[in-house]
Image (tube, helix red, strand yellow):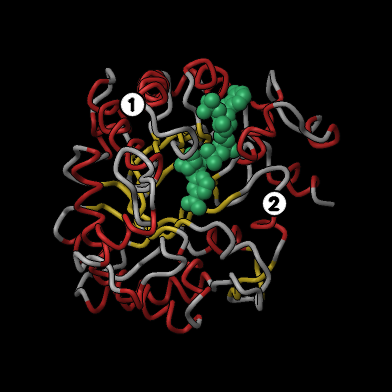
Amino acid sequence: MATADGTYEYKLQHGDEFGRTYFRRFNDLAVSSIGAGTYLGDPTDAVDSRYHDALTTAFESGINVVDTASNYRCQRSERVVGRAVEDADVSRDAIFVSTKGGFLPFDGSRPENPGEYVREEFVETGLVSREDLVRGSHCIAPDFVDAQLDQSLANLGVEEIDCYYVHNPETQLEDNSPEDVYDQLEATFTRLEERAAAGDISTYGVATWNAFRVPEGDDQYLSLPEVVSRARKAAKVAENTATHFRAVQLPFNVFMADAFTVEAQSGPEGDQSALWFAHEAGLNVFTSASIAQGDLASQIPAEVAETLEGDSTVQRAINFARSAPGVTSSLVGMSRSEHVEENVEAGRFDPMGADAFDAVFE
Ligand SMILES: NC(=O)c1ccc[n+]([C@@H]2O[C@H](COP(=O)([O-])OP(=O)(O)OC[C@H]3O[C@@H](n4cnc5c(N)ncnc54)[C@H](OP(=O)(O)O)[C@@H]3O)[C@@H](O)[C@H]2O)c1
C-alpha cells in the first residue's frame, strides 16, 4: 500500500521539478495532482503493452496516482496496472492505486453474447442475484462488491488497495428508489469498513458520472451529504473509530464544470456545489475525464486558455481541472508514453489561484 514514508520520499525525489501544490495530501500521503487513468482503449495485447510503457513512464516521472476499475478493458486495465506497479523503478509504497467495483466485468475480451455470459458467470453461480442486477450489467450489493474486491486484489497483485470505489452507484436509480440505493450503499460501505479494518483497503469512496453534478430532482441525483452520513453509520456498525470513506470521483473539465457550478448538495449554510461540499467535508475529489476524453487536447475556449498556464492546450486543460477547489488529483487517461510526457509537464506550472478560478465563471 502507499505509505506516508514511501510517498513523501517520492515527493522529495520529484518535488523540485514541479510547481506549487503539485503534490497534495491524501490523509497522511503525498499524492501527485495529476493521476493516470486507464479507462479507454480496446481490450487487446497491443493496448496492454502501450499502457504498460505509459504507466511505468508515469510512475518514474512524477505521477504516483493510478486509477482503474475491474470492468475497464475487460479486467486488462487492472492487470496491466499491477504489472506496471511491479516493473516500474518505484517502490509500491510510493504509488496510490485506486480501483472500482460495480459493473460486471468481462474477462480478457468481450464475449460474443454478453447476456449469456452474465447469466452463466454471475447469476447462475449465485454471485449476483437478479433483483440486484440493473441494466443487465450493474450491481453494488455487498456480497458482489466483496467478491469483486478480492478479484481486484488478485488482478492488481497488491496486498492492499489504497482507495476502493463503488462504481457509478446512480446506475441503480434506474430500478430502485433513492432510499433503497442509500440503504444498499450503507450495507456495502459496512462491508468495505470491515475490509478496511482487515487491511485489504486503506480507504474507500464512490466514483460517479452524473450523481453529484445534476440538480436535485434529476433521475440520476444522489445527495453527497446523505452518502457521507451512510458511510459514518457503516463505520459505527463495523465498530471502526472513524469512517474510511475518503474520496469521491466525478467528471470535471473545462466543458463539464457542473460539479462546481450546480449547487445541489445541502451544506451547513445552504446548497453547495459537490466540489465545495467535498472540500469543506474534508473529502478528496479525483476528477475524471479531466481533458473531456481527449477533446480538450486540441481545443479550449480562448478566454479560458488565456487564464491558464501551460505550453500546450492539453496542459492548460489539465491545469484547469486540478485548480478547482477540493481537487486532490485530476485523472487523465493516457495509454501512450508521449502523452504521459506531455501531461506530466503540466505540473511544472502553478495551478490557478482561487480568485482566478472563480473569475472564469463570472
Ligand atoms: N464514472 C467513473 O468512474 C469514470 C468515468 C470516466 C473516467 N474515469 C476515470 O478517469 C480517468 C480519466 O478519464 P478518461 O480516460 O475517460 O478521459 P480523459 O482523461 O479526459 O481523456 C483520455 C483520452 O485523452 C487522450 N490523451 C491523453 N493525453 C493526451 C495528450 N497529451 N494529447 C492528446 N490526447 C491525449 C488519451 O489518449 P491515449 O490513451 O491514446 O493516451 C485518451 O483517449 C479514466 O481513465 C478513469 O480512470 C472514471
Residue lying at 19% horizontally and 39% vertically, measured from the top left: 158
Q: Is residue 113 left or right of residue 124?
A: right
Specify which label sits upstream in the sequence, 2 or 1. Answer: 1
Whether residue 20 can be seen here: no
Q: Which residue is mark 1?
A: 10
Of residue 195 and residue 9, the one placed in the foreground of this image is 195
Residue lying at 28% horizontally and 22% vertically, measured from the top left: 90
Residue 199 locus on image (x, y percent):
16, 54
The quadrant in which the N terminus is found is top left
Mark 2: amino acid: Ala
Residue 257 is labelled as 2
Report the number of discs: 2
Q: Is residue 125 left or right of residue 163?
A: left
Circle 2 packing at 10 Å, graded few (<14), some (14-19), many (20+), is: some
Query: Dividing the picture into quarters, in which one does residue 204 lie?
Result: bottom left
Query: Dividing the picture into quarters, in which one does residue 317 lie?
Result: top right
Ligand 1 lies in quarter: top right
Position above or below: 154 against 278? above
Of residue 70 and residue 46, the one placed in the foreground of this image is 46
Residue 50 locus on image (x, y percent):
41, 20
Residue lying at 69% horizontally and 46% vertically, measured from the top left: 354
Position above or below: 243 against 181? above
Mark 1: amino acid: Tyr
Q: Which element type, helix, strand or loop, lies under badge 1? A: helix
Residue 157 is labelled as none
Query: Dividing the picture into quarters, in which one does residue 55 lie?
Result: top left
Q: Which element type, helix, strand or loop, lies under badge 2? A: loop
Residue 175 locus on image (x, y percent):
49, 77
Position above or below: 9 against 271? above
Circle 1 packing at 10 Å, graded few (<14), some (14-19), many (20+), is: many
Q: CA distance from mark 2 to mark 1?
A: 31 Å
